[in-house]
Amino acid sequence: MVREWDPGTASSAEIASLLDTLNAVLAVDLPRDPPWRESSLREYLSEVMPGERRISWVAQAEPAAGGAPGPILGQVNVLLLGDIGVLEVLVHPSRRRGGLGRDLVLVAARRAYQEGFQSIGVEVVGDTPAVAFYESLGFSKEYVETRSVLDLSAVDWAELSEMAAGIGAGYHLEFCPGGPPDDLIDAYARAKAEVRDVDDGELRPSSYDPQRLRDSLDCLHRRGMKPYIVLALHEQTGEVAGLTEVVVPAQHPTRADQYDTIVVQDHRGYGIDRAIKARMLLELRSAEPRLTEVQTWNAQANEAMLKVNAELGYRADREWCEYSVDVAELVHRLDAGR
Ligand SMILES: CC(C)(COP(=O)(O)OP(=O)(O)OC[C@H]1O[C@@H](n2cnc3c(N)ncnc32)[C@H](O)[C@@H]1OP(=O)(O)O)[C@@H](O)C(=O)NCCC(=O)NCCS
């Protein structure tokens, strides 16, 4: 049975059941990824940025003989932001290839269609059944990134200290756990805005103006995701010359996510990229002692970033693709196949 579902008011048993399904999915599709924990999972699923909505549905097994609710075997949610819908679908491995994935996509696609959305996108992990699934539904590949993972136990910390110190004169680094300090928010947003069209095209949404940046930091905190930032400050002007962002999610606190790394055009060529990333890892070592890995996503064309990541010890893991589809065509195709 597929029904609309609000993670904000769902019972704890349902949240725990969804977690079991998510971890069963990870165990077969991404066996090297750490299993998720329940910590802040409800908030992770329910909190959104101002102006965004996430609508969810679950597929739940029939109640057991004693009347206890059945387990959650699948889930879909669509995040509606601006004029884009972003889809996420999960089906328990024991229930796959029975048409449940298709049913879940249909319910979300119908809603996106009713709400006037023209296209939906989805992140698809390479080498998993999701590739054939979305291609069978008519989604097409728009963009490919590579996910890389850094194993902190293999890091040469002495070499990293040298990298962190290897920055041109006239700059200094600042570590900001929790987010940029308030007096640097404007300069921080300017640095992000300047490179938005130029740089690496990473999948993570960026924040370009100070208010949006504050909202996005608030949203991260509410979802149980702790941001850490290292800034390179240009001493003469006080401008943010470079920044790197890592988030440690309560749901998988042993593996952090590297978000944006930006070096502003005028400040390139001074070793800032390498230094800020190295300093971040050194700081995380003491701030987050449970951390064992960091993962990052890069466009395959971004050779400069890939080179620095390789020097730091990141190893390419998988393709991470963005697919999209026209909503009306998707609804039509799925309805016709029923
Ligand atoms: C992708 C996923 C949702 C598919 O769910 P499902 O219930 O098995 O999908 P369906 O049964 O509706 O399949 C629909 C069609 O997709 C295609 N398909 C699905 N899985 C496939 C596979 N393993 N190989 C080839 N084709 C496949 C087939 O054409 C299938 O139709 P058919 O069974 O009539 O041939 C499921 O595998 C899943 O949850 N994957 C994890 C997704 C995810 O987000 N992971 C993130 C962490 S890895």
Image (cartoon, helix red, strand yellow):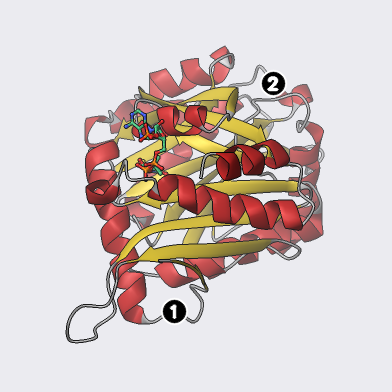
Crowding at dot 2, Cα within 10 Å, few <14 / some 14-19 / many 20+, comes out as few
Q: Are marks 1 and 2 in contact (CB under 8 Å)?
A: no
| Image: 201 above or below 213 | above
Badge 1 or badge 2: first in the primary sequence: 1
Q: Tell me where residue 196 appears, x and y as whole percent.
A: 76, 33
| Image: 16 above or below 54 | below
Task: Indicate left or right for 98 with 335 as reference.
Answer: left
Residue 183 is labelled as none
Q: Tell me where residue 335 appears, x and y as whole percent.
A: 59, 45
In which quadrant of the rendered view does residue 244 lie? top right
Residue 133 appearing in the image: yes
The residue type indicated by label 1 comes to: Ala
Gap in Å between the C-alphas at discs 1 and 2? 49 Å
Between residues 303 and 118, which one lies in front from this camera angle?
118
Q: Tell me where residue 158 appears, x and y as whole percent.
A: 30, 30
Task: Indicate left or right for 29 with 318 as reference.
Answer: left
Between residues 37 and 95, which one lies in front from this camera angle?
95
| Image: 66 above or below 170 | below
How many badges with numbers are in the image?
2
Residue 34 appearing in the image: no
Residue 268 is labelled as 2
Residue at 29% in and 72% down = 62
In which quadrant of the rendered view does residue 69 lie? bottom left
| Image: 179 above or below 206 | below
Residue at 74% in and 57% down = 114
Mark 1 lies on a secondary structure that is: loop
Between residues 12 and 243, which one lies in front from this camera angle?
12
Point out the frontmost of discs 1 and 2. Answer: 1
The residue at which mark 1 appears reads as 10
Task: Indicate left or right for 201 with 68 as reference.
Answer: right
